[in-house]
Image (cartoon, rainbow, N blue to C red):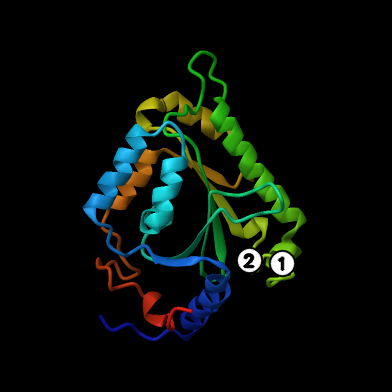
Amino acid sequence: MDFEYDGELDRRVNAAHQILSPIGFKRVCALESIEPIVIARFRSEVEAATNEKPMQKILWEHPQILARFLGPGHCWWIKQEVRLGNELRPDFMAARTESIFLNYRLVELESPTALWFNPSNGKPAEKMVEAVQQVAEWRHWIEKNQDYAQKPKPFGLGLANLTRHYMRSQIVIGRRKSVTDADRERLNAMKSVEAGYTVHTYDSVIERSKRFPVNDYGQEGDDLCVECHYIADDL
C-alpha cells in the first residue's frame, strides 16, 4: 500500500529510534508475524512455570509477543530490566511515539500460579501486593528523579520525556481460571484514579499474540506498519 507522507510522524519515529536504540532498546513492530511454534512454546512455559523467570526469558527472545500485548499496529522500543536507581528494575520497559513524542509502559511479571486475591478473606494476595507496590515505587522514583531519567547518558538514563504522566504500568499475574468476577470487582475498587496501572492474566498475553493485528488503516499484514516505512537504517 502507498502511504500518504506524514512529515511529523517521520520526525517523531526517527527521533525515538535515534534516542532509544543506542541505549539498548530493541525496535519491535507489533505487526510482525509470530510463528505458531513460538506462541505454543510461550503457552507451554506459562502452563509449566512456578515463577515468572521463564516468561522473562522467552519474552526477551521474542519481544513481538510483548509488543502485540502492549498495543498492536505500531512500533515499540523494548528493553529488559531498565535500572531505576540502585534497586528498582522493571521486568520490561517499552516506549512508543505518539502525539506527545514518547509514551512509556513498564511491565511487571509475576508467577502464572499467583492469585489476585485470597479466597479465604478477599484480601489482595501476596504477589499482587508486591506487584502493586513495585508499580507505586516506580512512579515515585520517576516523579522524584525525572530530570536525571531524561538526561542523555552518561549524565542520566537517556529516557527522553519520561515522567509519571507519560508512563503507565502493566502487571501480568496468574491465570484467568483463578480469577473470579468478585476478584475483578475488588481490583477495580482497590485501584485509585491515579493508580496508573492495569492488571492482566497470562491468558490475555497468549490471546493477543494470536490475533491478526491491523495497522492504522485497518489492514492486516506484517509489511503494512506505517511507522516502519519511516525508520531509517537501524543504528
In percent of width and height, residue 179 lies at 41, 28
Number of other residues with Cα within 10 Å of mark 1, as a class: few under 14, some 14 to 19, many 20 or more: some
Q: Position of residue 32 (x, y in %)?
A: 31, 65
Q: Is residue 230 left or right of residue 120?
A: left
Would residue 203 be found to the left or right of residue 1 on screen? right
What residue occupies the far top of the structure in this picture? 120
> In front of the other: label 2 or label 1?
1
**Residue 134 on image: x %, y %:** 63, 41
**Badge 2 density bin: few <14, some 14–19, many ≥20, Cα 10 Å:** many
User: Is 190 placed above or below 72 here?
Assistant: above
Image coordinates for residue 21, horizontal then vertical, percent: 52, 72
Q: Alpha-carbon distance for marks 2 and 1?
A: 8 Å
Find disc 1 in the rendering and name its residue. 156
Front residue of 48/103: it is 48
Identify the residue shown where x is 26% and y is 58%: 212
Q: How many marks?
A: 2
Residue drawn at the location 53% of the way across and 19% of the way down: 122
Residue at 40 percent of width and 75 percent of height: 227
Q: Amino acid at mark 1?
A: Gly
**Which image quarter: residue 219?**
bottom left
For this view, does 181 lie left or right of residue 145? left
Q: Is residue 191 visible?
A: no
Q: Amino acid at mark 2?
A: Leu
Callout 2: SS: loop
User: Which quarter of the figure is the N terminus placed in?
Assistant: bottom left
The residue labelled by disc 2 is 159
In depth, the one of 126 and 185 nearer the eye is 126
Name the secondary structure under disc 1: loop
